[in-house]
Amino acid sequence: MGPLQRPQMVLCDLDGTLVDSVPDLAYCVDTMLARLGRAPCGETAVRNWVGNGLERLVRRALVGALEGEPDPLDFDRAYPIFLELYAEYTFERAALYPGVREGLDFLKAAGYPLGLVTNKAARFTGPLLRHLGLYEDFGIIISGDTLPACKPDPLPLQHAARHFGAEPAASLMIGDSVSDVRAARAAKFGIICTSYGYNHGQDIRDSGPDAVIDSLTELTGILAPSR
Ligand SMILES: O=C(O)COP(=O)(O)O
Ligand SMILES: [Mg+2]
């Protein structure tokens, strides 16, 4: 059996894989823009900009596009406003996607060591996971600012593999974006993606993950059942 059917370790992404965090992020982005006297960008745009950390999200909101750099003075004014807002509204509207609790329970019952690797900053990851009752599910939690590099760099995945003593080539990542696929490929992990997450407006199938699922409950048909 390969890493897809019986992995030595499973890592989960957070935003767009376990949690729909965009309603809170969009609220904070638009409130930040309003405080700066600027027009809101709306939830659909924010949905396309999540996945490369909060700093990048704010830069994208300021230029109104996925690429490009805002005026440094604008960014220096905006970013602290966003951080203050998101600290207050980290999980006001956040919800687990359907099937997440069941999927994680299946993985735990099957005995897979579980880790979480997100590009979200650590100061928000912990409170969000605790609020959603997920914090205790993971043996390691690696946020976007935990290590010197974040996804799509393979470093957080390699770090988690070392933590659990797992072979990268026998390990599995579950994510939603091209950054998860790139990090997994660079680390030699298997990669399963959710169809419902955030991938900058692109179909995640175009990035060529090993499998695409509509719900984490589908893991029961892909991974080996409980030992
Ligand atoms: O971009 C973010 O802040 C978080 O994204 P991730 O949990 O999908 O890595
Ligand atoms: Mg994600």
Image (cartoon, grey):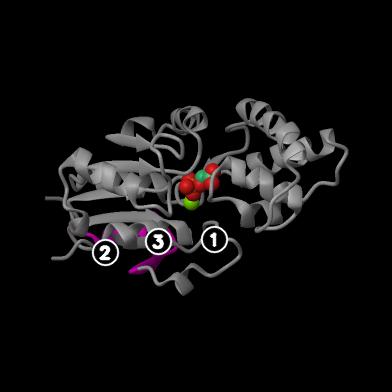
Please tell me the numbered disc located at residue 222.
2
Q: Residues within 10 Å of mark 2 (few under 14, many from 20)?
A: some
- The quarter of the displayed image where residue 183 is located: bottom left
Which residue occupies the foreground of this view, 139 or 51? 51
Mark found first going from the N terminus, 2 or 1? 1
Residue 221 falls within the magenta-colored stretch: yes
Q: Which residues are magenta?
A: 210-224
The percent coordinates of residue 206 (x first, y second) are: 48, 74
Q: Secondary structure at mark 2?
A: helix
The residue lying at 71 percent from left, 57 percent from top is 65
The percent coordinates of residue 186 (x first, y second) are: 32, 60
Q: Secondary structure at mark 1?
A: loop
Q: List the residue tagged with mark 3.
A: 182
Q: Residues within 10 Å of mark 3 (few under 14, many from 20)?
A: many
Q: Residues within 10 Å of mark 1 (few under 14, many from 20)?
A: many
Which residue occupies the foreground of this view, 24 or 147? 147
Q: List the residue tagged with mark 1.
A: 199
Nearer mark to the viewer, of 3 and 2:
3
Q: Secondary structure at mark 3?
A: helix
The residue lying at 68 percent from left, 56 percent from top is 68
The percent coordinates of residue 97 (x first, y second) are: 49, 49
Q: Residue 176: in sight, yes or no? A: no
102 in relation to 181, above or below: above
The residue lying at 86 percent from left, 43 percent from top is 38
The percent coordinates of residue 219 (x first, y second) are: 31, 58
The residue lying at 85 percent from left, 46 percent from top is 39
**Amino acid at circle 1:** Asn
Nearer mark to the viewer, of 3 and 1:
3
Q: Report the Cα–Cα distance between label 2 and label 1.
A: 23 Å
**Amino acid at circle 2:** Ile
